[in-house]
Amino acid sequence: MFRKKYLKLILILPCFLVLIQTAGADYKKEREKLVQEHIVKDGIKDPEVIKSMLTVPREEFVPDNLKKMAYLDKPLPIGYGQTISQPYIVALMTELLRLDKNDKVLEIGTGSGYQAAVLGTIVDNVYTVEIIKPLGIKAKKLFKRLGYSNISAKIDDGYFGWEEHAPYDAIIVTAAADHIPPPLIKQLKKGGRMCIPVGQPYFAQVLKLLEKDEEGKIFIHDILPVIFVPLTREIQN
Ligand code: SAH
């Protein structure tokens, strides 16, 4: 009786393992296709960014019912009216930050945690802030499960940055504000870069690159029109 049960388990287990492995292999293939056909083809050149986009499993950061769409070059809903950004935009913003391995990076708008994971694959330390508590908690758990031990996350209004760990070599904001928050400019190191969408909610936003030179002078460049969810100001429990 017992033996039969075990025998069944022994027979079934390899089938499950094969299934899991095959799914993993498919995602890897889809990821490679996305990187070749969108990220590289559309002009992303930084080898570290490309490597990171080839590594981070985007399917882990999207809701279960959307996993089959994880490797379309599209933003996807993640609940609470928020979205995981389009992979090309994630790659572009990451490239614009001109990261070095030992950089300390601040992200405002953790969301699914995907952008933070892409950053965390490239640099030693990532700090990320999310204003919607359930999203922040979910992302924190995911970082732990996937082994991103160099990402620290907190729930707060990211308008004020994360003072405790400032200054940062680079700052990335993944929600659009109608102005660049002055606390973020303050928390950027001299010689640092910030990438941020600026504009009205869901309308006429421009992705901007802000650079602070070694004397602390600020230069702002317009990169391209984008659509991001708005930067909100109230912590949502
Ligand atoms: N980087 C995310 C994109 C998420 S969308 C990803 O890779 O999935 C933008 C996120 O910014 C949302 O989760 C939204 O809740 C969050 N957000 C909006 N205003 C914020 C604020 N003031 N501080 C921190 N996070 C904010």
Image (cartoon, helix red, strand yellow):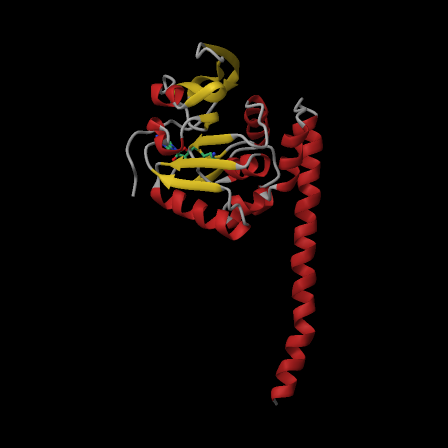
Which residue is at a point 66% across and 53% down the rendered structure image?
23
- Return the residue nearer the eye: 207 or 121: 121
Quadrant of residue 13 within the rendered picture: bottom right
Question: Picture coordinates of residue 61 (x, y %)?
Answer: 52, 44
- Pinpoint residue 161: horizontal percent, then vertical percent: 37, 29
Q: Is residue 56 above or below residue 167?
A: below
Residue 232 lies left or right of residue 25; in this view the side is: left
Identify the image quadrant of residue 38: top right
In the orientation shown, which residue stands out farthest toward the front? 215
Whether residue 92 can be seen here: yes
Quadrant of the snapshot with the N terminus: bottom right
Residue 38 in view in this figure: no
Q: Nearer the viewer, residue 55 or 23?
A: 55
Figure quadrant, ligand 1: top left
Above or below, 59 against 85 in this view is below
Query: Which residue corresponds to the image point at 60% horizontal and 87% vertical from the top-left?
Result: 2
Task: Name the foreground residue: 54 vs 38.
Answer: 54
Choose between 44 and 220: the one closer to the eye.
Answer: 220
Q: Quadrant of the C terminus?
A: top left
In this rendering, the answer to whether 201 lies above or below 134 is: above
Give residue 187's position: percent from left, percent from top: 39, 24
Image-quadrant location for residue 133 = top left
